[in-house]
Amino acid sequence: MKVGVPTEVKTDEYRVALTPAGVRELVDAGHAVYVQSGAGEGSAISDEAYVAQGATIVPDADAVFGEAGMIVKVKEPQLEEIARLKPHHTLFTYLHLAADEALTHGLMESGATCIAYETVEDARGRLPLLAPMSEVAGKIATQAGAFMLEKPLGGRGILLGGVPGVAAANVIVIGGGVVGMNAAFIAVGMEATVYVYDRNIDRLRELDIAFGGRADTCFASTLQIEERLPDADLVIGAVLVHGAKAPHVITREQLGLMKRQAVLVDVSIDQGGCFETSHPTTHSDPTYEVDGITHYCVANMPGAVPITSTYALTNATMPFVVDLATRGVHDAVANNPGLKLGVNVAAGEVTYAPVADAVGLQPVDVDTALAGVPAGA
Ligand SMILES: NC(=O)c1ccc[n+]([C@@H]2O[C@H](COP(=O)([O-])OP(=O)(O)OC[C@H]3O[C@@H](n4cnc5c(N)ncnc54)[C@H](O)[C@@H]3O)[C@@H](O)[C@H]2O)c1
């Protein structure tokens, strides 16, 4: 298989989908790897480091898409990239389609087989390719929230951990999964007063043990969240219903219950956002204000720390990349039910039900759709 790695083109995105370690694994397995010149630069990986492990450097994205049958990326394809996708391509990357109808239609029209990192599952129903970036995003969420609470940045002007004689800030984390747990751990480490909300009671039990009393766990009913909002300095939204559009856990009306210049960090923004007033922002311009509440809604938070994120991501994706390249998409998917769940679009059809539901289409069975994918893809 010919595997291609383009430079990421989303605003402020510095990660790359394959490291020299990944090139080595693929080349040792008999594959050819085409890396766009400069693709690793943002993550401090030189072209020479890829070449040393057997990659071929090509000058531009056209050459990557032209040479390769399988394209590995980090972020969802941008317009110029969708235009390069053909039916023989297998695209392996984050997609977050439930939040993006236009992208869904673009990928359907391309005819490519599009496998989303964020819906691949392991044998226990967890999300092994989302988890490493959720760990990073969770940790950044608290750092960013603490920073945005500073007065010169438009925040309330409160220090997360307080000082002797002055109370700490109150941090509310809604959604206690991978993002939420990591966000809460950093908040606890900064000595804030922390409350973690979730609707899954078993998850709350696990968190209760993990925090050992250093954070309170709470059931995420509308009323219980509403009752806590007047005390909140920082609210981190981190809910996820696998592959689906995020539910709104704070409405615009409820902003009125909060202190002015409190901060909302919506990590779930890549799935459409879990606060009614959220819309995606970038690292260059990360916040905006609604009704006196600062909103931070950066859709690619881990992109800000590429040296950590690139390695965390590729450690998790690499075995799947090698398997897809070695078996081809039909065989790889047939052999791994968790990978099969990653197939969101194939042969012009949406194959992942929560995405189809979010964009108003009928899902098509993965095997039926894959039957229309050219052999050898
Ligand atoms: N913005 C970014 O850069 C970035 C980076 C990584 C992950 N994310 C996103 O962060 C979100 C969370 O990811 P994760 O890996 O922690 O997911 P996860 O599945 O590990 O955790 C989600 C949690 O939300 C809980 N939940 C679902 N509905 C809820 C509700 N109505 N109220 C309260 N809790 C609810 C679930 O029980 C679960 O514990 C996802 O949308 C993911 O795509 C964003």
Image: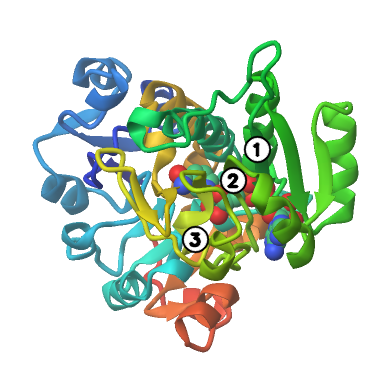
Question: Which type of secondary structure does the marked residue at label 2 adopt?
Answer: strand
Image x and y of residue 208, in percent: 88, 36
Residue 171 place in picture, x, y as percent:
65, 38
- Three-letter amino acid code of the residue under disc 3: Gly
Disc nearest the viewer among 3 and 1: 1
- Of badges 3 and 2, the one in the foreground is 2
Q: Is residue 167 left or right of residue 8?
A: right
In terms of depth relative to the viewer, which is nearer, 25 or 271? 271
Please state which of residues 219 and 367 is positioned toward the viewer in this rendering: 219
Q: Residue at x 72, y 31 (%)?
A: 193
Do the residues bearing badges 3 and 2 touch, measured as CB atoms within 8 Å?
Answer: no
* Residue 273 image label: 3
Q: Which mark is residue 212?
A: none
Furthest toward the top, the residue is 164
Cα separation between marks 3 and 2: 13 Å
Are dots 2 and 1 in contact, CB under 8 Å? Answer: yes
Answer with mark 3 or mark 1, whichever residue precedes in sequence. Answer: 1
Q: Which residue is mark 1?
A: 171
Q: Is residue 205 left or right of residue 97?
A: right
Quickly name the residue at label 2: 235
Establish if 361 lies above or below 138: below
Give the structural element (helix, strand or loop) at label 3.
Answer: loop
**How many circles with numbers are drawn on the protein?**
3
Dividing the picture into quadrants, the one containing residue 88 is bottom left
Instruction: Point out residue 51 in the picture as x, y percentages from the top left corner.
Output: 24, 20
Q: Amino acid at mark 1?
A: Val
